[in-house]
Image (tube, helix red, strand yellow):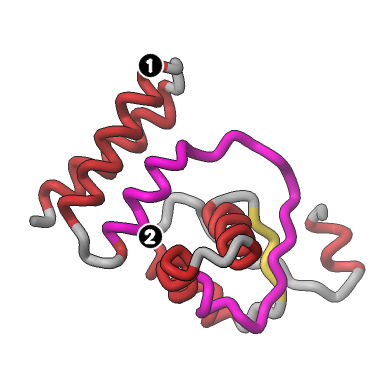
Amino acid sequence: MSKGSSARSSLYLTPVNRYLTAEEAAYIVNDCGATSIVVSGTLGTLSRFAELAARFGLADRCAELEPLVTPFDDQFILETCIELRCSVAWLLGGLAHVQGRRDEAVAHYERALAFETANGAVLMAQRTRADLERVRASG
């Protein structure tokens, strides 16, 4: 949706940079009073994983994902594009880190880094390397 079309429809756009932390993004979304979220990043990915976990009855995965999407339970998730977002190992590293399982997060990030590097995903590997170093420094 262009800025002009949003103004004509009486919608307000509040951009949220994808490089913000989850806490920073949640603050912006909650503070602006959003009723819908248009995503092409992590929330879209998490919502797909949550949907699959529920569909296949994976209770442990549901328990892990539920707190991550709960803050947005009164909003829509609209995906605007399809893009190669991340390796699953990277996502699992983030989920483990969020739950305070530092050693598991490090192991996931190390697998993600090896996988991304082996497959030539240079930008993803850079992000994973930065996340890995952040988690290592936090412990």
Asked if residue 83 is among those painted magenta in the image, a careful observer would answer yes
The region drawn magenta spans 69-97
**Residue highlighted by disc 2:** 21
Numbered circle sitting on residue 88: none
Q: 124 or 88, which is in the foreground?
A: 88
Find numbered disc 2 in the image and state the secondary structure of the residue it sits on: loop
Q: Residues within 10 Å of mark 2 (few under 14, many from 20)?
A: few
The residue positioned 52% from the left and 78% from the top of the image is: 70
Q: Is residue 109 left or right of residue 68?
A: left
Q: Are marks 1 and 2 in contact (CB under 8 Å)?
A: no
Which x, y percent locates residue 66?
A: 49, 73
Q: Answer with left or right where residue 101 lies relative to residue 21.
A: left
- Residue highlighted by disc 1: 118
Given the image, on which type of amino acid does mark 1 rest?
A: Ala
- Viewer-nearest of labels 1 and 2? 1
The CA span between labels 1 and 2 is 27 Å
Q: In which quarter of the image is residue 128?
A: top left
Q: Which residue is drawn at 42% across and 31% down?
A: 124
